[in-house]
Image (cartoon, grey):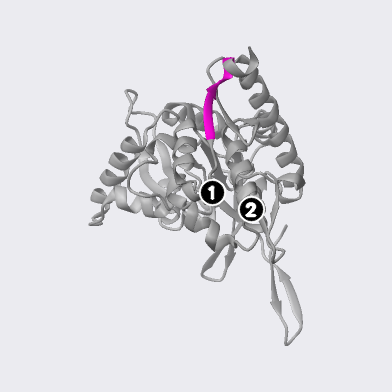
Amino acid sequence: MPIYTFEHQTPLITKLDAVSFSWLGIGERAHLQAALKNHIQAISPDTLVISEEFCEWDDSKRRIDLLGIDRDGNIVVIELKRDETGAHMELQALRYAAMVSTMTFRQAVDIYQKYLDRSGEAKNAKSELCNFLNWQEEGTEAEFPRGVRIVLASADFSKELTTAVMWLNQRDLDIRCVRMKPYKLDQTVLLDIEQIIPLPEASDYQILVRQQALVQKTAKTALESKTRTKYKFDNSIYGAGRLVLAVIQKICADKPNYNLEDLRKIFPKEILGSFEVITTKAEAENILQRSCHRRHFLNPEDIIVLADSQELSVCNQWSQYATNSFIQYIPKDLGYVVDIISHDEHFN
């Protein structure tokens, strides 16, 4: 879409002509990258840059323009181009994503500390990261990273690139294409920044595709696993996340006057670190829209409705370690009993 100036007193609408970064004398690294590393929200909201020109592997010629972490605990690979085709940047970014996919939280802290030190910022990387992720200092490292996202930012993208990215996203990758179109207005450069993949109007469809893939993957994993832990509670057998949901549903039934604050006092965020154990249905839906990943139980039968009609949703991101920790937080005076059983014991 073109950009126009509007003089309301005349009135007059004038179309601005798009220009190129090269015509403006704007360099890819010296100008675009230098600006975006300090204003990354323009192309990747809720992201913290932890390194620039990252190359901590054997082939030092391969460098990630900007490396970040988002608030969901994903590693974010950000690649920049000033041309109008993208120039195979998706293939380059895929290689980089594979290389950083095994990064541990401790490694991320070390990488970020080096970046802060080079920038002359007297900050503690671990504290800064934990604060950004809303994590406690300990007990959450095992959950990192939750995944790897890719952000491609360019003046425009070729049809071949966008076709490849859409195909990859259908296979459960998370690649976003952000177009940065420059315009000249007198001595000012205007940037029209727009995410073109995934398209906002297509987000609902893509969420459904991701949810279907996740359900199928989970079902397959459950069938193939012979050591997955199961839990017995209130005469029923549950997996980790479903156990948490069942316990909280029963508490709300037994204590109908409890509100969200009461429940969070019983089950604080420290149990999971990245997410509240319980949140409002509206916030859970917002998280789903932002990340394209279902982090909460959102089926109608799973929504908890309190006495004041407030609707709550329970987080579904539960490892065995976190689930066992959750069990320890169940108030003893409720008399609830949770037995841990093996997958084999349940089905044999």
Residue 223 spot, x, y in % from top left: 65, 17
Point out which mark residue 334 bears.
Answer: 1
Residue 155 spot, x, y in % from top left: 59, 48
* The residue positioned farthest toward the top in the image shown: 348
Residue 330 spot, x, y in % from top left: 49, 46
Towards the viewer: 170 or 189 = 170
Residue at 31% across, 37% down: 106
Residue 340 falls within the magenta-colored stretch: yes
Residue at 72% across, 46% down: 203
Label 1 neighbour load within 10 Å: few <14, some 14-19, many 20+: few
Residue at 42% across, 37% down: 64
Q: What type is the residue that disc 1 sits on?
A: Leu
Label 2 neighbour load within 10 Å: few <14, some 14-19, many 20+: few
Q: Is residue 37 visible?
A: no
Q: Which residue is mark 2?
A: 254
Which residues make up the magenta segment?
338-344
- Drawn side of residue 156 relative to residue 102, left or right: right
Quarter of the image containing the C terminus? top right
Towards the viewer: 73 or 79 = 73
First-in-chain label (2 vs 1): 2
Residue 34 spot, x, y in % from top left: 39, 53
How far separated are the C-alphas under marks 2 and 1?
9 Å
Q: Is residue 228 visible?
A: yes
Quarter of the image for residue 141 reads top left
Q: What type is the residue that disc 2 sits on?
A: Asp
Q: Secondary structure at mark 2?
A: helix
For residue 210, above or below residue 71: above
Looking at the image, do the residues carrying marks 2 and 1 touch, with CB atoms under 8 Å apart?
yes
